[in-house]
Amino acid sequence: MPDPVVTRFAPSPTGFLHIGGARTALFNWLYARHLGGRMLLRIEDTDRERSTEPAIAAILDGLSWLGLDWDGDVVFQFSRAARHREVVEGLLASGGAYRCYASPEELAEMRESARSEGRPARYDGRWRDRDPADAPAGVKPVIRLRAPQEGETAIVDQVQGRVVWQNKDLDDLVLLRSDGTPTYMLAVVVDDHDMGVTHVIRGDDHLTNGARQTQIYQALGWSVPGMAHIPLIHGPDGAKLSKRHGALGIDAYRSMGFLPSALRNYLVRLGWSHGNQEIFTDAEMVAAFDLPQIGRSPARFDAAKLENLNGHHLRETPAEQVLQAIEVILPDVGPARGLGPHLDPELRARLLASLPGLKERAKTLIELLDAAYYLYAPSPLALDAKAAAILDAPARARLAAITPALAALPEWNTASLEAAVRAGAEALGVKLGQLAQPLRAAVTGRGTSPPLFDVMAVLGRDVSMARIGAQARAEGVETTPNAA
């Protein structure tokens, strides 16, 4: 039996969980779930100056909202510094590492010399075989890996194929800084080994790191995990993804009204394919996902495609779940719309009843919430430009003419409302739309809405009649029964 698959997502908490990081987490999560393995979460917080608690919280919150659960406790890399130093001490004892006393000035001179000669800047190994007795007094050394100088280092990447580096082009990298703190390269290897990681899935900007880390694994006599370096995400113009393209935090996509299921579906198709299938449930993604199906070319972010996909997921998601998603973002988006951070029971019930119609037309939760304005709008109801144009004097007169019939309805439901309005239009000698459109404008304040009679039924008799009456009584209205 092969060892169970263990993947890991290992973000640095120096900012929010961005869209590229979210896709990397998703790919790790899917691969582990596909093979019945585990995905671990490690916060790589060794950069103490840039790592922040708010960033850690944002990462954990973003993953949780996106629905990407991890196995076991979160591992914090900084807390393992003693273990990292222990490993380096073992390398020093075995000769796999050495102390380097090169001064900052010497290193700067090496870089300048390489630049002037058109060579890559590399450490020249001057302390590699030097007698430690020559060490200058009072200087704290760094610890460097004694990397192989001949031959090649290769990784067989499950996305990029076999990638080879000549060892003469890879210098002796620093494992411990002069203050005793571990470098990223060392910490990643030790942590991945100790956590039992079998597959490292990350962006292809780490490809060269794969070679350097392989050398550390080999120096320690440890098995090298499988690697899969996935192409980065580019903008629609082919340039590196930036904020102007949509390189925002996951929290921003949540506040813009995207559903987690839609974002998962969109992200999985950024660089991975399964035939021509575009729309996936979670179960379908888990069943189909594998690393060889990831392409080598950068994926392109398309905001319009994400919106369209989100609209599909809105339509397919049960109303109660959509409402719960709205309630998640309400503290952020509600105040700008005159809503509090929570829905009162009456408004919640109205919104839930209206969702089947509302979610047919919306692409995001924000669009849906704005389309539901009529449910929570304060009095007097503000009209948009289209509604104001509809409610001219003849239209207001038709409202006044239908008011008595609506007020006299024994039951206020979709069927009775439609029957009354149809009869009213016939009595007035007008087409149904000539009465229904002013009614829509009066009760919603908008020129378009979900089906009118559903809207009026959800609003209820009192609210609907008050809004219709307010428009029918507006200045210049003629209230003759046959106004057309």
Image (spheres, rainbow, N blue to C red):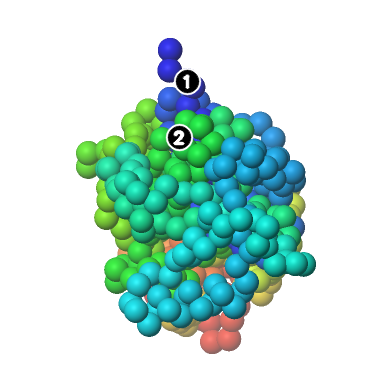
**N-terminal of the two: label 1 or label 2?**
1
Report the residue marked by disc 1.
Answer: 3
Please tell me whether mark 2 sits on a helix, a strand or a loop: loop
Residue lying furthest left: 276
Where residue 321 sits, quadrant-wise, is top right
Residue shown at the point (43%, 25%) measured from the top left = 35
Q: How far across and how far down the image is residue 295, in percent?
A: 27, 47
109 to 305, vertically: above or below:
below
The residue at the point 27 percent across, 43 percent down is 161
Residue type beneath disc 2:
Pro
- Percent x, y of residue 101: 63, 64
- Location of residue 52 by image quarter: bottom right
Mark 1, mark 2: which one is toward the viewer? 2
- Residue 137 shows in this picture: yes
Q: Where residue 294 appears, x then y in whole percent?
A: 31, 44
Q: Residues within 10 Å of mark 2 (few under 14, many from 20)?
A: some
**Amino acid type at image mark 1:** Asp
Task: Say if 117 sits above or below 138 in the image.
Answer: below
- In the picture, the quarter occupied by the C terminus is bottom left
- Residue 419 shows in this picture: no
Q: In this rendering, would 25 be left or right of 437?
A: right
Task: Classify residue 92 as left or right of residue 139.
Answer: left
Q: Position of residue 482 (x, y in %)?
A: 43, 72
Q: In the figure, 373 relative to 175: above or below?
A: below
Relative to 282, is 187 above or below? below
At x 35%, y 64%, the residue is: 234
Helix, strand or loop at label 1? It is loop
In the displayed structure, does residue 80 sit left or right of residue 452? right
User: Residue 107 versus residue 351: which sits nearer the camera?
Assistant: 107
Marks 1 and 2 sit apart, C-alpha to C-alpha, by 11 Å
Residue at image mark 2? 225
> Residue 292 versus residue 322: which sits nearer the camera?
292
